[in-house]
C-alpha cells in the first residue's frame, strides 16, 4: 500500500486514521517529507507509516492517553531499533474532516 502523495512540488506521507482514533488524530495524517526525490520519499514514507501504525496500536492499548505524536524527527517508540531518517524539519498537518 502506498502512503505517498506528490503535491505542490513535494512528497507527502498521507494515511487515513482508523475510525476509533479519529477523535484524537483527525481523519487523515499528512506529513510533508520535504523532498522531490521519489526514492528518498518512499523510504521516509514507509518509515513514518510504520511509526504511525505503531502509534495507532499503542493508542488503542493504553486507551488513547496523551502521548507525543510521531514526526519524521521523533518517531513513535517501538520495541525494536530502526535506522533514523535523514534529519531535517518535517511539517505535520492534521486534517479533520
Image (spheres, rainbow, N blue to C red):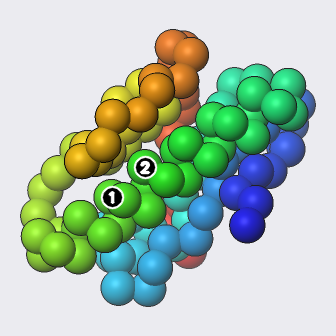
Residue 37 placed where, x, y %? 85, 25
Quarter of the figure with the N terminus: bottom right
Res 16 label: none
Image location of residue 11, percent across then percent down:
78, 37
Q: Is residue 39 above or below residue 88?
A: below
In the image, taking residue 71 as reference, residue 85 lies left or right, namely: right
Tell me if residue 79 comes above or below residue 83 in the rendering: below
Q: Is residue 19 above or below residue 41?
A: below
Q: Residue at x 61, y 63 (%)?
A: 15
Judge left or right: residue 6 versus residue 68.
right
Q: Is residue 32 visible?
A: no
- Left or right of 35? Residue 21 is left
Outermost residue toward the bottom in this view: 19
- Callout 1 crowding tier (Cα within 10 Å): few <14, some 14–19, many ≥20: many
Hey, which residue is sitting farthest top in the picture?
Answer: 87
- CB under 8 Å between callouts 2 and 1? yes
Does residue 30 appear in this view? yes
Residue beneath disc 2: 51
**Residue visible at 54% across and 53% down in the picture:** 49
Q: Secondary structure at mark 1?
A: helix
Quickly name the residue at label 1.
Answer: 55
**Residue at position x 64%, y 44% in the image:** 45
- Which quadrant does the C terminus fall into? bottom right
* Picture quadrant where residue 12 is located: top right
On screen, residue 50 versus residue 63, left or right, reads right
Provide residue 86's location: percent of width, then percent of height: 56, 16
For the image, the number of numbered tags is: 2
Mark 2 residue crowding within 10 angstroms, few (<14) / some (14–19) / many (20+): many
Between 37 and 96, the residue placed more toward the observer is 37
Label 2 and label 1: CA atoms lie apart by: 6 Å
Q: Residue at x 11, y 70 (%)?
A: 62
Amino acid at each position: 500500500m502506498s502512503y505517498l502523495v506528490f503535491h505542490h512540488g513535494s512528497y507527502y506521507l498521507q494515511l487515513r486514521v482508523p475510525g476509533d482514533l479519529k477523535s484524537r488524530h483527525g481523519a487523515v495524517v499528512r506529513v510533508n517529507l520535504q523532498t522531490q526525490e521519489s526514492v528518498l520519499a518512499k523510504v521516509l514514507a514507509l518509515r513514518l507509516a510504520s511509526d504511525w501504525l505503531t502509534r495507532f496500536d499503542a493508542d488503542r492499548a493504553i486507551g488513547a492517553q496523551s502521548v507525543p505524536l510521531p514526526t519524521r524527527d521523533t518517531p513513535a517508540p517501538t520495541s525494536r531499533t530502526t535506522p533514523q531518517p535523514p534529519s531535517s524539519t518535517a511539517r505535520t498537518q492534521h486534517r479533520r474532516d
